[in-house]
Image: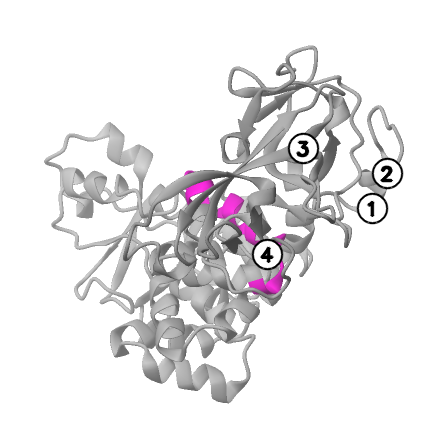
Amino acid sequence: MAGAGTRVFISHLSALAVFDPNGDQVGRVRDVVVSLRIGGRPPRVLGLVVEVVGRRRIFLPMTRVTSLESGQVLTTGVINLRRFEQRPSETLVLAELLDRTVTWIKTGEEVTVLDVGMVQTRLREWEISKVFVQVGRAGRLRKAKGERLTLDWQDATGFALPEQDQGAANLLATFEQLRAADLASVMHHLSAKRRAEVAAALDDERLADVLEELPEDDQVEILGKLKDERAADILEAMDPDDAADLLSELPGEEAERLLQLMEPDEAEPVRRLLSYGENTAGGLMTTEPIVLEPDATVAEALALVRISDHKPALAAQVYVCRPPNETPTGKYLGTVHFQRLLREPPYVLVGSLVDDDLDPLPPDTPLSLITSYLATYNLVCAPVVDEADHLVGAVTVDDVLDHLLPEDWREAALHGLGDEERDEEREVTGGR
């Protein structure tokens, strides 16, 4: 454990790995729980919110932390694996205090919280001692850089105001390196108000990626709090199949209004997806597979497969069609798996490598037959072709899993394991 008097700024704890005494990683720090106290007394640090396997969040009391040094957190190994539930008397530092506007008592100026420092007392308890701030409100941080200084906790007031508008720049900086799925987990555990503030601060591409990883209720809530023009921009940035799934959750008039605001060429594939049945190949497919003409070379095909924007399942094979190359394409000729591409010289034409042995899926193929098709032929992606032999899209295994799992699977994944599994605890110490 850091010695008494050692100060630790809490943003530095974000995403640190947590280890047990045997050196096995337990999870990663996602936040710090404190209890605000009256009379200007420094808040007491109760513990850490740690994300463990399955994106479940647990509470790790500070009494179970043995070290906060060397870029890692060490514990006694005695961990309660019950899911963390925030109590009304508790405050999450990263989620609720960063970017908060408070008042510097000495001058009466408004200052924005950039970070919070905690210190271990002589009694080996932790409490908040310092606040790193910037003069000015959060909304102006990106436009004008004010003076930055470190205040004692009791030198500022306004930390407990519940409905204050906050920015999100510093919270997002703390989680800058997170994958979209992990940032979605962070946002899911925020209050609705804070979630809207974070969504407003994210750029369109990042927010689109995060929305695709959130439960449907969160998606609808966030989209509903955006201005229509920005909501349309976000839908354009999403994969067409994910955008269609989200729009299908909205009232018809609202969905049509957003479609009207989208660029016509972006809205058209989404409208097409909405026209198919929900649990059919047409309803599950993406409209953006990798399509090549038969006179394209292996080198060109591999260059497209390497593009990082393509999901791994979509990059597993390319589809060879007559022009036009965008769905719905010209006549569908067949597929070429990327392993075949790797075995051929770069100058070979993909038209000579086409595999046309397997019949493609019609758009009205039901989910049960899609799963059988993928399992029978060991595929992670399959073409969807209409009656006129036009490639209209491709169904990937992740699209199928989304619909095979329970409707609330994202919700369950973000909360952690089910109730039965949650009760199977390791070294339970009881409630905190």
Residue 216 within the segment the image draws in magenta: no
Disc 4 marks a residue whose amino acid type is Gly
285 sits left or right of 128 in the view: left
Marking on residue 423: 2
Q: Position of residue 330 (x, y in %)?
A: 22, 67
| Total marks in image | 4
Q: Which residue is nearer to you in this view: 272 or 421?
A: 421
Corner quadrant of residue 337: top left
| Mark 3 or 2, nearer chain start | 3
- How far apart are the alpha carbons under marks 3 and 4? 18 Å
Q: Which residue is mark 1?
A: 419
Report the mark closest to the observer, 3 or 2: 3
User: Split into 4 quadrants, where in the image is the C terminus?
Assistant: top right
| Mark 3 or 1, nearer chain start | 3
Q: Which residue is nearer to you in this view: 9 or 20?
A: 9
Disc 2 marks a residue whose amino acid type is Asp
Q: Which residue is mark 4?
A: 158
Crowding at dot 2, Cα within 10 Å, few <14 / some 14-19 / many 20+, comes out as few
Per the rendered image, the range of residues in magenta is: 173-193
Asked if one can make out residue 371 in the rendered structure from this viewpoint, the answer is no
Residue 185 within the segment the image draws in magenta: yes
Corner quadrant of residue 375: top right
Is label 2 in a helix, a strand or a loop? helix
Crowding at dot 1, Cα within 10 Å, few <14 / some 14-19 / many 20+, comes out as few
Report the mark closest to the observer, 3 or 1: 3
Q: Residue at x 40, y 47 (%)?
A: 134
Q: Which residue is nearer to you in this view: 108 or 322?
A: 108
Disc 3 marks a residue whose amino acid type is Glu
Q: Position of residue 56 (x, y in %)?
A: 68, 41
